[in-house]
Image (tube, helix red, strand yellow):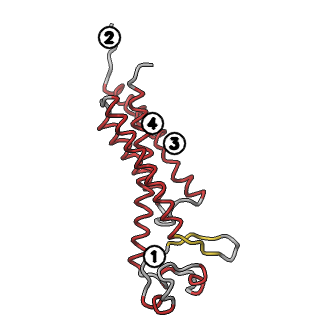
Amino acid sequence: MAENRTGLDSFHGLLGDVQKLWKWIVVAGSGPFIAKFLGVAPPWPAALPFITAAFMLVAIVLVYQIYKRSSRKTVNKVLIRFSVLLVAAFFLYLAIYSEFTFDVPLPNGSSVVRIKGFVCNDVALTVHEKSCPWLGERELSGAEWTPENLWRSWSITVVRLMLVLTWLTTFMSLSAVLACFANFQKRTAA
């Protein structure tokens, strides 16, 4: 005998599915928050962990929607491409972070990370002609640890955006790899 389902039963089912999805989002989205806590996230913008979690969700939804019925061969190609993108974006992020960030010492002994630029302003070019734009701690200290006192603001903005772009690409690629793998394995017989 067939079970009679009402619209309310369907609605409860939908609520259950949404609840499971939110649990998954919380677990998957915790990576950027952990990275921020560990001090390896870009210092700008402050809301980047939330933005990253949203972008990760978009990557997961896209993978599910686009590749939900793809063949093993297609899924393998997609996994390889996203894995290569993940590794490339991660190492590019590390290179940019390493080269274009610096720690500003605070009176309490801690520090805060700031972003450098790559084009010196006119004052810095006059004072530090030979070392521009690769200015170090001595020059930063003399500029009161304020990047805008040494570099053109647009070049600082470009570095900020490059850090965010490589950061988001890393996490979106990771999400895509995991979602593609999980989606394919879910429909594969044991």
The residue carrying mark 4 is: 19
* Camera-side mark, 1 or 2: 1
Q: Earlier in the sequence, mark 1 or mark 4?
A: 4
Whole-number angstrom distance, CA of label 2 to CA of label 4: 27 Å
* Picture layout, residue 156 above or below residue 5: below
**Which image quadrant: the C terminus?**
top left
**Mark 1 touching mark 2, by CB under 8 A?**
no
* Camera-side mark, 1 or 4: 1
Question: Camera-side residue: 101 or 6?
Answer: 101
* Camera-side mark, 1 or 3: 1
The secondary element bearing badge 3 is classed as helix
The residue carrying mark 2 is: 2
The residue carrying mark 3 is: 27
Amino acid on which the number 2 mark rests in the picture:
Ala
Q: Residues within 10 Å of mark 3 (few under 14, many from 20)?
A: few
Whole-number angstrom distance, CA of label 1 to CA of label 4: 44 Å
Task: State left or right for residue 45 relative to residue 143.
Answer: left
